[in-house]
Image (spheres, coloured by chain):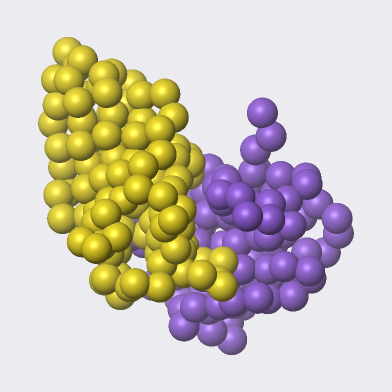
Chain colours: A yellow, B purple
């Protein structure tokens, strides 16, 4: 099941710079997208979401952009902090269902 | 801040044994889920539960799996006869109507 793809397994960014994490999807029926952050030995923690009727949602240092025509979304973290180092999962939900389809995750490392 | 609580954090069981994973969802949530993550793989949906019945399940969720909400607070996942390939992190999650899912910290199940 490759409906949600995160093609970059890892990303390394200097503290204070912008982190951009990307996600692509194939199912045009997805209408809601989420980003989760996960530390080792913990469950995913919700970060930010976006509905398909929007193209941008912002919450503090986190902004999610949605390009429906390209079936692409991205998470921008600015400025990046060492505490942001974690695995970031993109997830999508199809209209009329509850289940989330997760990507494989991108490991972000923010170094001083 | 309310959170989803899972017990135990780690469960070791012999192949063929029954195991019950327990979860206490956030108290005012209406939707309950189980996901799992096999080591090195993506987080996969197992089942969703609403109004005391399964609302959706994946092909992974076969007859050896069952869920129950035995009282007003607990939500359990039972695996009747565990197999080696059931070894994974199992995450419980809950959500309100039209809200994001909040995940527990997970139960690491090791089948030997």
Q: Nearer the viewer, residue A30 or B67?
A: A30
Instruction: Determine whether, in the image, residue A53 is placed left or right of residue A65.
Output: right
**Residue B88 to residue A97: above or below:** above
Residue at the spot x=45%, y=45% of the render?
Answer: A49
Please identify the quadrant where the N terminus of chain B is shown.
top right
Residue B73 coordinates in the image, percent (x, y): 81, 52
The count of marks equals 0
**Residue A44 to residue A78: above or below:** below
Residue at the spot x=16%, y=42% of the render?
Answer: A10
- Residue that protrudes farthest toward the bottom in the picture: B63
Residue A6 coordinates in the image, percent (x, y): 22, 55
Residue A83 coordinates in the image, percent (x, y): 33, 21
Name the image quarter holding residue A11.
top left
Residue B6 coordinates in the image, percent (x, y): 63, 47
Residue at the spot x=66%, y=60% of the render?
Answer: B32
**Can residue B36 be seen?**
no
Residue at the spot x=36%, y=42% of the render?
Answer: A56
Name the image quarter holding residue B2.
top right
Q: Nearer the viewer, residue A57 or B5?
A: A57
Q: Nearer the viewer, residue A48 or A39?
A: A48
Name the image quarter holding residue B11.
bottom right
**Can residue A1 be seen?**
yes
Please identify the quadrant where the C terminus of chain B is shown.
bottom left
Q: Nearer the viewer, residue A58 or A93?
A: A58
């Amino acid at each position: 099941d490759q409906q949600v793809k995160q093609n970059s397994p890892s990303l390394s960014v200097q503290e204070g710079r912008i982190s951009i994490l990307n996600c692509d999807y194939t199912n045009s029926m997805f209408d809601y997208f989420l980003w989760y952050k996960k530390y080792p030995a913990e469950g995913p923690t919700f970060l930010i979401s976006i509905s398909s009727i929007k193209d941008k949602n912002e919450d503090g240092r986190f902004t999610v952009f949605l390009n429906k025509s390209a079936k692409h979304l991205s998470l921008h973290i600015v400025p990046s902090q060492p505490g942001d180092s974690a695995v970031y999962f993109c997830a999508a939900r199809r209209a009329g269902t509850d289940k989330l389809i997760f990507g494989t995750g991108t490991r972000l490392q923010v170094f001083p | 801040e309310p959170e989803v609580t899972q017990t135990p954090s780690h469960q070791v069981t012999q192949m063929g044994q029954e195991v019950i994973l327990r979860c206490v969802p956030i108290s005012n949530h209406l939707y309950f889920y189980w996901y799992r993550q096999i080591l090195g793989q993506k987080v996969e949906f197992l089942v969703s539960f609403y109004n005391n019945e399964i609302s959706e399940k994946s092909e992974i969720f076969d007859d050896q799996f069952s869920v129950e909400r035995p009282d007003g607070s607990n939500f359990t996942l039972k695996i009747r006869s565990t197999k080696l390939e059931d070894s994974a992190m199992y995450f419980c999650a809950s959500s309100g109507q039209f809200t994001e899912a909040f995940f527990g910290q997970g139960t690491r199940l090791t089948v030997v």
